[in-house]
C-alpha cells in the first residue's frame, strides 16, 4: 500500500492509494478527485478515455468524505497539491458518503465543536494534529538523549499539588480521591531513585474558566532532576524548547503554511537566547509608560486593519455573484479568513482597555493573570523567562531565595506574541522543617503528605523541575488563538462531548 506522502518515491509507477474525497469537480470527460489519506492530499484525474464506463460513472457519484481505493500512474506536476498527481486507471468505492455537514461556508465555533469528530478532518485541524504529534515525539527524544527516563505518576491522588480549589473529587472505594493536578510530587520521589526523570500524562483542573488558554483536561510534561538548582532548571527548559521548535520547523514546513503561521518568531526562538527577567523587572515593565504607549498604538493599528479588511470583504462579496466556480471557491475561503480575523480584532479591541487598566494598576506581590502575560510577551520576539516570584503567590513546595525570603526560586516561561505561560517550575524546598511549616501555613493536611515528607528525611538533596503544558505549547507553535484546537477532543467548562 502506498501513501500520499510517499508519492515522490514512485514517480511514473502504478500505485494504489486508499482514502477519502476531500474535494471534487468535473468537466467534460474528466473527474478531478482530491484525495486525502491522513498523510496529505493528492489530485487524482479520472479520464473517460482511460477507465471503464462503470469506473467513470462511479467517480462522478463521489461526494466529500466518500471512501475509496484508487489506482493509477504517479505523474510529477509542480502545479498540483503536493507536487504529484495520480492519473487513474481503476477505483473501488467503499462508501458514497451522505451530504457532509462541514462545508466550505463559514461555520460557528459551537457548530464545529459539536462536530469535532468530523472537524478533525479539515486541513487546518489535520495540520495542527500533525505538529502536535511531532512535539510529543521530540519531547521524548530530547529527554531520552539527555539521560532522563520516563516514569508515570498516578491519575488518582489523595492530596493536592497546586491548591485545593481546582480539584476534581471522586469516590475511591469509600475514600476521597482526586484527579491529578500534576505528577510533580511523585516525580520528586522518582528522581530520588533515578536522578533525572520525566512524566508525561493527563492532568485535571476544575477551573470554572472559559478563556482561550484553559482546558479542564490537558497533558503535562514534568521533568524532575536531583542536584539541579534554579539556574540549571532554566537552562534545561530553554534547551528543551529550542529542540522542540527546531524539530517542528525541520519537519512541518507545509503544515505551518496551511496554518498560515509566521515562522519568524519560531526561528528567532531557536537562534536567539531567551530573555530572562525577574518578577520585579516584569512588574516595572508592565506599569511603564512604554507599555501604555504600545497598547495605544495597538488599538489604532487594529482599528485601521478592521476598516481595511471590511472594505475587502465588501468588494469580494460583490465579485462573488459573477465569478467563475474556481474563483468563488477562493472567495469563500478568503471570506472565512476575514471573518476569523475580524473576530480576533474585535476581541483585541474589547481587551485593550482592560489590559491597559490592569497593567497600570498592577501591584507588586500579585500573581500575573493571563492579560498581564499577554502584555508582557507582546514586547518580545523570543520566549521570556520570568524568575523569582513573590513566595506568597506560589506553591508550598517552592524553595525561598536565600538572599530574599519574600521570593521563591520559581520560574515561568512565557511564549511571545501574547501567548503567555507555557512552562512553570521551581527549585524545590529540600529542608524538612521548612516544608512542614509551609504545609501548615497553606492549611494543608500534614497526613496527606507523609510520604512526600519522607523524601526530606532520607537523603534530601537540592532538586528542581518544571511542567510544560502541551496544549499551550502547540497553540503557540501553530499560531492558534484557542487551545480547543490543540487537542483532538477538548474538555472545557460545559464541553463533555463528543
Image (cartoon, helix red, strand yellow):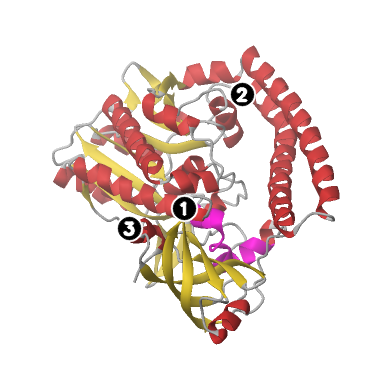
Number of other residues with Cα within 10 Å of mark 1, as a class: few under 14, some 14 to 19, many 20 or more = some
> Alpha-carbon distance for marks 3 and 1?
12 Å
Which residue occupies 31% across, 46% down?
138
Secondary structure under tag 2 reads: loop
Q: Which residues are magenta?
A: 111-128
Q: Earlier in the sequence, mark 2 or mark 3?
A: 3
Q: Position of residue 22 (x, y in %)?
A: 57, 66
Q: Quadrant of the N terminus?
A: bottom left
Number of other residues with Cα within 10 Å of mark 2, as a class: few under 14, some 14 to 19, many 20 or more = some
In the rendered image, which residue does mark 1 sit on? Answer: 83
- Indicate whether residue 116 is drawn in magenta: yes
Secondary structure under tag 1 reads: helix
- Label 1 or label 2, whichever lies nearer to me, is 1
| 24, above or below 481, in the image | below
Chief secondary structure of the magenta portion: helix
- Residue 355 visible to the viewer: yes
In the rendered image, which residue does mark 2 sit on? Answer: 362
Amino acid at each position: 500500500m502506498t501513501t500520499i506522502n510517499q508519492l515522490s518515491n514512485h514517480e511514473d509507477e502504478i500505485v494504489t492509494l486508499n482514502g477519502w474525497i476531500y474535494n471534487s469537480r468535473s468537466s467534460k470527460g474528466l473527474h478531478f478527485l482530491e484525495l486525502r489519506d491522513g498523510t496529505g492530499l493528492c489530485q487524482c484525474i479520472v479520464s473517460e478515455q482511460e477507465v471503464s464506463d462503470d469506473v467513470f460513472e462511479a467517480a462522478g457519484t463521489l461526494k466529500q468524505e466518500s471512501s475509496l481505493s484508487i489506482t493509477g500512474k504517479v505523474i510529477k506536476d509542480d502545479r498540483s497539491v503536493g507536487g504529484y498527481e495520480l492519473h487513474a486507471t481503476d477505483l473501488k468505492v467503499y462508501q458514497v458518503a451522505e451530504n457532509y455537514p462541514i462545508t466550505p461556508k463559514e461555520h460557528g465555533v459551537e457548530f464545529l465543536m459539536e462536530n469535532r469528530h468530523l472537524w478533525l478532518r479539515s486541513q487546518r485541524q489535520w495540520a495542527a494534529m500533525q505538529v502536535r504529534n511531532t512535539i510529543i515525539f521530540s519531547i521524548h527524544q530530547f529527554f531520552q538523549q539527555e539521560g532522563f527516563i520516563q516514569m508515570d505518576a498516578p491519575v488518582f491522588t489523595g492530596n493536592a499539588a497546586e491548591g485545593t480549589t481546582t480539584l476534581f473529587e471522586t469516590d475511591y472505594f469509600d475514600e476521597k480521591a482526586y484527579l491529578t493536578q500534576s505528577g510533580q510530587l511523585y516525580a520528586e520521589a522518582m528522581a530520588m531513585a533515578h536522578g533525572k526523570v520525566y512524566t508525561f500524562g493527563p492532568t485535571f483542573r476544575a477551573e470554572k474558566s472559559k478563556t482561550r488558554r484553559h482546558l479542564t483536561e490537558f497533558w503535562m510534561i514534568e521533568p524532575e532532576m536531583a542536584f539541579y538548582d534554579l539556574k540549571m532548571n532554566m537552562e534545561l527548559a530553554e534547551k528543551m524548547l529550542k529542540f522542540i521548535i527546531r524539530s517542528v520547523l525541520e519537519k512541518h514546513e507545509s503544515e505551518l503554511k496551511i496554518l498560515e503561521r509566521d515562522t519568524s518568531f519560531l526561528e528567532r526562538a531557536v537562534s536567539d537566547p531567551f530573555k530572562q527577567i525577574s518578577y520585579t523587572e516584569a512588574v516595572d515593565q508592565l506599569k511603564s509608560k512604554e507599555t501604555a504607549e504600545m497598547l495605544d498604538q495597538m488599538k489604532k493599528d487594529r482599528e485601521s486593519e478592521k476598516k481595511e479588511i471590511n472594505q475587502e470583504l465588501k468588494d469580494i462579496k460583490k465579485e462573488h455573484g459573477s465569478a467563475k466556480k474556481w474563483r468563488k471557491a477562493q472567495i469563500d475561503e478568503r471570506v472565512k479568513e476575514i471573518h476569523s480575523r475580524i473576530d480576533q480584532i474585535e476581541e483585541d479591541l474589547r481587551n485593550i482597555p482592560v489590559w491597559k487598566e490592569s497593567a497600570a494598576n498592577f501591584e507588586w506581590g500579585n500573581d500575573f493573570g493571563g492579560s498581564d502575560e499577554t502584555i508582557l510577551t507582546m514586547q518580545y520576539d523570543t520566549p521570556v523567562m520570568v524568575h523569582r516570584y513573590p513566595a506568597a503567590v506560589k506553591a508550598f513546595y517552592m524553595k525561598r531565595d536565600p538572599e530574599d525570603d519574600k521570593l521563591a526560586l520559581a520560574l515561568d516561561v512565557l511564549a511571545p506574541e501574547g501567548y503567555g505561560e507555557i512552562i512553570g517550575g521551581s527549585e524545590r524546598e529540600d529542608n524538612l522543617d521548612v516544608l512542614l511549616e509551609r504545609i501548615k501555613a497553606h492549611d494543608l493536611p500534614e497526613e496527606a503528605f507523609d510520604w512526600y515528607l519522607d523524601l526530606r528525611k532520607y537523603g534530601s538533596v537540592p532538586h528542581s523541575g518544571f511542567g510544560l503544558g502541551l496544549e499551550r505549547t502547540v497553540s503557540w507553535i501553530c499560531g492558534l488563538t484557542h487551545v480547543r484546537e490543540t487537542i483532538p477532543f477538548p474538555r472545557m467548562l460545559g464541553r463533555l462531548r463528543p
